[in-house]
Amino acid sequence: MKVKIQSIHFDADQKLLKFVEEKVEKLNQLYDAIVESEVFLRLDKDNEKGNKIAEIKISTPGKTLFASEQCKSFEEATDNAVEALRKQITKHKEKLRGV
């Protein structure tokens, strides 16, 4: 699986990029039909909820899954988005199996 990471309006450091890539690659263990994933890291103006946004889009044959989370840190937002995608992948696999 290819993981593309784009940081919008800021330069992400290597440690953050490595963290995000490792988290997203773990989804491949759950579902090996993932073709590619795109991660968008953005800063928002809203400081109350947290101004770090992580959006993850995963492409599988016939379906695209998407999750977006906003938190106080990119790590937390990434964790939450990956967890949301984990649930979506589980539902998608159940649907494919006809459960």
Image (cartoon, rainbow, N blue to C red):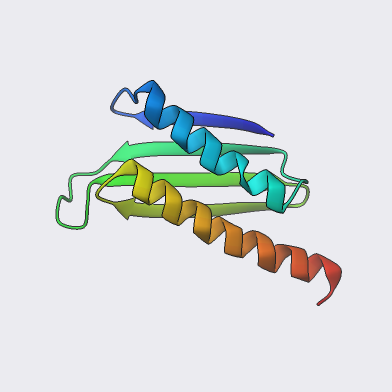
* The residue positioned farthest toward the right in the image shown: 97
Quadrant placement of the C terminus = bottom right
Q: How many marks?
A: 0
Q: Is residue 43 above or below residue 2?
A: below
- Indicate the quadrant where residue 45 lies: top left
**With 20 as the anchor, is 2 left or right in this view?**
right
Residue at x 29% of width, y 52% of height: 71
Which residue is farthest bottom? 99
Residue at image coords 21%, 57%: 49
Residue shown at 59% from the left, 32% from the top: 3
Left or right of 67 on screen, residue 37: right
Q: Residue at x 56, y 42 (%)?
A: 24
Position in image of residue 96 (x %, y %) = 81, 65
Q: Position of residue 57 (x, y in %)?
A: 56, 45
Name the foreground residue: 13 vs 60. Answer: 13
Q: Is residue 78 above or below residue 2?
A: below
Q: Position of residue 84 (x, y in %)?
A: 51, 60
- Direction left: furthest residue: 48
72 or 53, nearer to the observer? 72
Residue 51 in picture, x, y percent from top left: 23, 46
Quadrant of res 19: top left
Quadrant in the picture for residue 42: top left
Indicate left or right for 11 with 67 as reference.
left
Q: Quadrant of the N terminus?
A: top right
Is residue 8 toward the left or the right of residue 51 in the image? right
